[in-house]
């Protein structure tokens, strides 16, 4: 019955469950993202798949009508749960659900209107392609709406430190969605296979989560349907800021294939997506960390333990920074070989594009993570407003640089904008953490050493791997392991905290071995 008790929250246990659950789902997403692309190209063709990528960008833009309510609901419920205010949990959940349902209705209407006017965005589509894509768009739209509503419900479970059930369901749902897409592709159901898999995934997720949340509320005597004006007012006062943030992030979240379809060709959209795919998966892996840590960080800050919160954030920086640099360094070194073995070098846009994409992805990751986790401190308005202005500037630059530099302008625009706003978010975080000059000096020194070391290591390894001809994924795997080990050693040597971590683990293994020996 522990899954229905709310009297003994464990942040450590919650984080562990979220890590295992999120990364299990991520493995399924990686399988779909990598193994299925050759299937898409085989069964759909470059042109139809490229057009689907373009329409997918429009669906992603529509997600702004979620208003970011789910994030705010998680933060508010985490705060109320930290205070053991069950009445507050009830009012914040139901008020958030009502606001979410209202905006989902608007999303459905707007999405349906766009679905019957797709030809106005992509002039090169034939009538047959327009009809097929419109139907697929509508199915994906409903799946998006259900998915956004499920985010609020599952987020509430996470805020209440009860993520286990939701994660198990999410893994099952993701697997069934994957199987659905594969079966429909093999049966030649054209592009409809992709949104059908999305629909199965969201339906299988949301229904059990609703039942579990209802039982959880009931067994802890929390009213499911409680509404108060003061709670609605709290949400509505922040809604404009959430809208700005959500509009911005949705507009530029996956807009590149759409812009390429509008101003270039569907085939180039495929080449760009293929070249970016591995880097995008690395960013997805890293992004999950923020989602895992958000509820616990909100709890920690709500407990008014600034010293512990500051120490946690410093440790997080010392771990995430080198890990992210390591991941994107491997992407730069291995991407050409990977794409060649995966779908063929004819779909690869070149090494320069890979470097630009890596730069844009890592700066975008830092910007997203800093702004997202900033709201765990209760600082809601600033990051949401900043995300909006960042996205608007980014969108303008994407258009202008695409016109002047072609497809290469897209990652340049993202990198330039993200870099400026990373500096802004760091300034804002410093106001909350109140780091002293010594702590700032140590962080800067550590960061500079790791960055310089990995740049040198990446450059050397890039030229070595480029001179090797790989004939299969086994050879690629062996080379990849050597590259990864080299980068890890480089990172460990130049990061005191990670070096200490590995030293402690090695010492524990030695101690254990000695105890067994004697």
Image: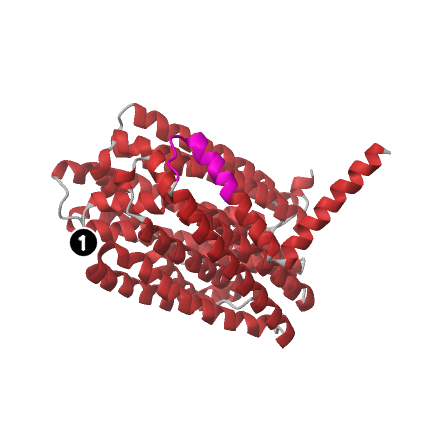
Most extreme residue toward the right, as rendered?
518
Residue 233 horizontal/vertical position (percent): 48, 67
* Residue toward you, 401 or 346: 346
Q: Main secondary structure of the magenta part?
A: helix
Residue at the (58%, 38%) spot, across then down: 165
Q: Quadrant of residue 385?
A: bottom left
Residue drawn at (41%, 49%) of the image = 332
Which residue does the image show at 83% across and 33% down from the upper left? 517
Residue 473 is covered by the magenta coloring: yes
Q: Is residue 87 visible?
A: no
Say how many tags the image has: 1
Label 1 crowd (10 A; few <14 / some 14-19 / many >=20): some
In this rendering, the answer to whether 502 lies above or below 244 is above
In the displayed orientation, state which residue is furthest to the top.
187
Q: Which residue is mark 1?
A: 263
- Considering the numbered disc 1 on the image, is that residue within a helix, a strand or a loop? helix
* Image quarter (top left, top right, bottom left or bottom right) of the C terminus: top right
Of residues 116 and 501, which is closer to you in this image?
501
Say which residue appears at 64% left-offset and 66% top-offset.
Answer: 310
Q: Is residue 461 left or right of residue 159?
A: left
Most foreground residue, 232 or 306: 306
Quadrant for the N terminus, please. Answer: top right
165, above or below 318, in the image = above
What are the residue bounds of the magenta stretch?
Answer: 468-483
Q: Can you give x and y, in whole percent of width and height, for residue 330 in the image?
A: 46, 47
| Image quarter of residue 88 | bottom right
Q: Position of residue 38 (x, y in %)?
A: 32, 33
The spot of residue 2 in percent (x, y) is: 69, 40
Compared across the picture, whether 121 is left or right of 195 comes to left
Image quarter for residue 309? bottom right
| Magenta stretch contains residue 333 | no
């Amino acid at each position: 019955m522990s899954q229905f008790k709310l009297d003994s929250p464990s942040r450590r246990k919650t984080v562990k469950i979220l890590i295992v659950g999120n990364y299990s789902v991520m493995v399924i997403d990686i399988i779909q993202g990598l193994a299925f692309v050759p299937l898409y190209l085989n069964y759909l063709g470059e042109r139809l798949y490229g057009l689907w990528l373009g329409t997918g960008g429009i669906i992603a833009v529509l997600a702004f009508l979620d208003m970011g309510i789910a994030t705010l609901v998680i933060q508010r419920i985490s705060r109320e749960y930290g205070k053991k205010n069950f009445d507050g949990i009830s009012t914040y959940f139901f008020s958030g659900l009502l606001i979410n349902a209202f905006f989902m209705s608007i999303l459905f209407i707007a999405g349906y209107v766009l679905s019957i006017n797709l030809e106005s965005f992509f002039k090169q589509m034939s009538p047959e392609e327009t009809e097929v894509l419109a139907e697929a768009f509508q199915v994906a739209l409903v799946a998006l709406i259900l998915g956004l509503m499920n985010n609020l419900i599952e987020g509430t479970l996470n805020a209440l430190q009860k993520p286990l059930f939701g994660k198990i369901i999410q893994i099952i749902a993701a697997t069934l969605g994957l199987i659905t897409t594969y079966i429909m592709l093999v049966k030649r159901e054209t592009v409809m296979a992709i949104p059908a898999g999305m629909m199965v995934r969201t339906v299988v997720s949301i229904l059990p989560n609703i039942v579990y949340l209802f039982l959880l509320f009931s067994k802890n005597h929390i009213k499911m349907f409680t509404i108060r004006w003061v709670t609605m007012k709290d949400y509505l006062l922040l809604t404009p800021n959430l809208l700005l943030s959500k509009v911005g992030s949705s507009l530029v979240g996956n807009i590149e294939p759409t812009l390429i379809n509008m101003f270039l060709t569907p085939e180039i959209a495929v080449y760009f997506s293929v070249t970016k795919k591995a880097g995008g998966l690395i960013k997805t892996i890293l992004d999950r960390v923020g989602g895992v840590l958000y509820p616990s960080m909100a709890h920690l800050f709500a407990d008014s333990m600034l010293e512990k919160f500051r120490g946690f954030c410093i440790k997080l920086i010392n771990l995430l920074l080198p890990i992210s640099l390591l991941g994107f360094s491997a992407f730069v070194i291995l991407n050409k070989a990977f794409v060649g073995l995966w779908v063929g070098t004819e779909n690869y846009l070149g090494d320069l594009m890979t470097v630009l994409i890596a730069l844009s992805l890592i700066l975008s990751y830092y910007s997203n993570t800093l702004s997202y986790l900033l709201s765990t401190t209760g600082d809601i308005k600033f990051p949401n407003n900043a995300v909006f202005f960042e996205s608007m500037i980014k969108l303008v630059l994407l258009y202008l640089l695409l016109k002047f530099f072609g497809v290469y302008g897209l990652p340049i625009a993202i990198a330039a904008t993200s870099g400026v706003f990373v500096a802004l978010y760091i300034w804002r975080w410093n106001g909350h953490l109140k780091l002293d000059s010594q702590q700032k000096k140590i962080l800067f020194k550590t960061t500079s050493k790791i960055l310089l070391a990995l740049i040198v290591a990446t450059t050397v390894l890039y030229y070595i791997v480029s001179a090797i001809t790989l004939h299969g994924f086994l050879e690629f795997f062996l080379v990849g392991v050597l590259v990864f080990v080299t980068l890890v050693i480089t990172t460990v040597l130049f990061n005191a905290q990670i070096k200490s971590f590995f030293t402690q683990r090695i010492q524990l293994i030695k101690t254990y071995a000695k105890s067994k020996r004697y």
